[in-house]
Amino acid sequence: METKDKYSRIAKLFDKMEEKMPMNKIKEKGIDTLSGKILEVGIGSGATLKYYGKNSDVTGIDFSIGMLNIAKEKAEALDLKNIKLLEMDIENMSFANETFDSVFSSCVFCTVPNPKKGISEIYRVLKKGGKVVFIEHMKSKNPILNIALKFLNIFTTWILGTSLLRETEKTIRESGFTKVRSENVMLGDVVRFIVAEK
């Protein structure tokens, strides 16, 4: 079964968990810094939609139609008329070059099959001078933490196709962004708040 189908099957359960995540305040902080025409990649079931203003110009994409259906219900309930929700693969986005002023990504690159390609696509669709906020969990620099992550990774990879051992910050820095700022926000340096500019 493909990863996107796994997420569609557990969409309702995932949504309930997502709404209660301790990381949500960090997501709200990230979204508050975005402006202009915004793209949220891997928007999932739309747990972040409540943080956008009614006049925000937001496009959200996800590869799971089951997740997107829940997100669409939330957008309608929140009366967010300027939100566009599209089924799309981050590795092959259909947007023209330099379409967006800001991009938001939260716990996405643990699941993207080819993270380098996905981040390169974000770089492509971002305008010059634009900004990306990544809130991502990844491999630690602490070997003790990595022992636990390696053990858990056996289950997350099998159940959801999600890796806990990605080196996402390194990939971001290698993808052409001129300014990258990183802050450790949870579990030591496992969860990082990264701002990258083009």
Image: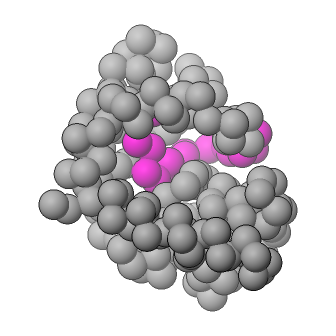
User: Residue at 71% across / 65% down in the picture?
Assistant: 190
Q: Residue 67: in sight, yes or no? A: yes
User: Residue at 76% across / 76% down in the picture?
Assistant: 144
Pinpoint residue 26: horizontal percent, then vertical percent.
74, 42
- Please state the extent of the stretch shown in magenta in the rendering: 29-47
Left or right for 156, reference 27: left
Q: Residue furthest left?
A: 1
The quadrant of the rendering that contains the C terminus is bottom right
Q: Where is residue 15, by image quadrant?
A: top left
Q: Is residue 113 magenta?
A: no
Q: Where is residue 83, by image quadrant?
A: top left
Q: Residue 88: in sight, yes or no? A: no
Q: Is residue 35 magenta?
A: yes
In this rendered view, identify the residue nearer to me: 22 or 128.
22
User: Residue at 62% across / 44% down in the picture?
Assistant: 36
Residue 104 vertical position relative to residue 29 in the rendered view, above or below: below
Left or right for 49, reference 68: right
Residue 80 vertical position relative to residue 140 in the rendered view, above or below: above
The quadrant of the rendering that contains the N terminus is bottom left
In this rendered view, identify the residue nearer to me: 44 or 139.
139
Pinpoint residue 13: horizontal percent, then vertical percent.
37, 31
In this rendered view, identify the residue nearer to me: 93 or 1.
1
Colour mapping used in the image: one colour
User: Residue at 71% across / 59% down in the picture?
Assistant: 191
Residue 192 vertical position relative to residue 124 in the rendered view, above or below: above
Left or right for 127, reference 169: left
Pinpoint residue 150: horizontal percent, then vertical percent.
56, 75
Number of numbered discs: 0
Q: Where is residue 97, by image quadrant?
A: bottom left
Pinpoint residue 166: horizontal percent, then vertical percent.
55, 76
